Amino acid sequence: MKKLFLNNGTGLNFDLGLLVIRIILGILMAFYGYEKLIHFNEMAASDFWTKNISFLGMSGAVPLALTVFAEFFCSLLLLVGLFSRFSLLVLAFCMAYIFLIVFPMQILSKGDNGYEFNSAFTYFVLYVGLLFTGVGKYSLDAKLFDK
């Protein structure tokens, strides 16, 4: 029972915590990306993606495809723990772009039931945190690349 309350941040508790965080983040963000993937043509032709989103001078389908790559495919890689650092960099960049450019610096916004956090900012902070800690020993990266 005493081991359950140890606060040293090493061992089983740490790696299981990283696994849970990685799985939850991967599943949640993959749902965002999956919706964009299955409705790609309608979304690419919508006014939001053609008029409001511009990445390196491109609008419409190109930024949407990059977003689908980040939100769906990189989330699946994060979920299984393969090429995790690359996936986290891509996901953090995507969330930073949304947070800084699409919804400029809106950490808090007034919602129907009070103030709401910008979800892109929340995901950005979590991805950066995982970049610093790594994804733990319960990942394909640890199995394939650790010596």
Image (cartoon, rainbow, N blue to C red):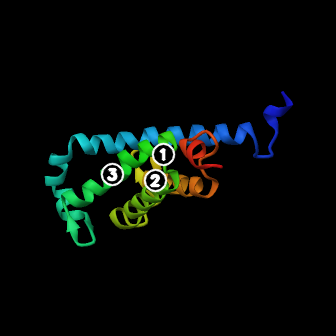
Q: Is residue 78 above or below residue 102?
A: above
Q: Quadrant of residue 56?
A: bottom left
Of residues 119 and 25, the one nearer the viewer is 25
* In the displayed structure image, the side of residue 119 where residue 63 appears, left or right: left
| Percent coordinates x, y for residue 51 in the rendering | 18, 64
Q: CA distance from mark 1 to mark 2?
A: 6 Å
Q: Measuring from the top left, give residue 83's x and y in whole percent.
A: 49, 51
**Quarter of the N terminus within the rendering:** top right
Question: Is 111 rendered above or below residue 51?
Answer: above
Closer to the chain start, of discs 1 and 2, is 1
Residue type marked 3: Phe
Q: Residues within 10 Å of mark 2 (few under 14, many from 20)?
A: many
**Residue position marked by numbered label 3 in the rendering:** 69
The residue that disc 2 covers is 87
Taking the spot 49% from the left edge, 39% from the top edge, the residue there is: 80
Residue situated in front as seen by the camera: 127 or 98:
127
- Do the numbered discs 1 and 2 sit on residues whose CB atoms are within 8 Å? yes
Q: Earlier in the sequence, mark 2 or mark 3?
A: 3
Is disc 1 surrounded by few (<14), some (14 to 19) or many (20+) residues within 10 Å?
many
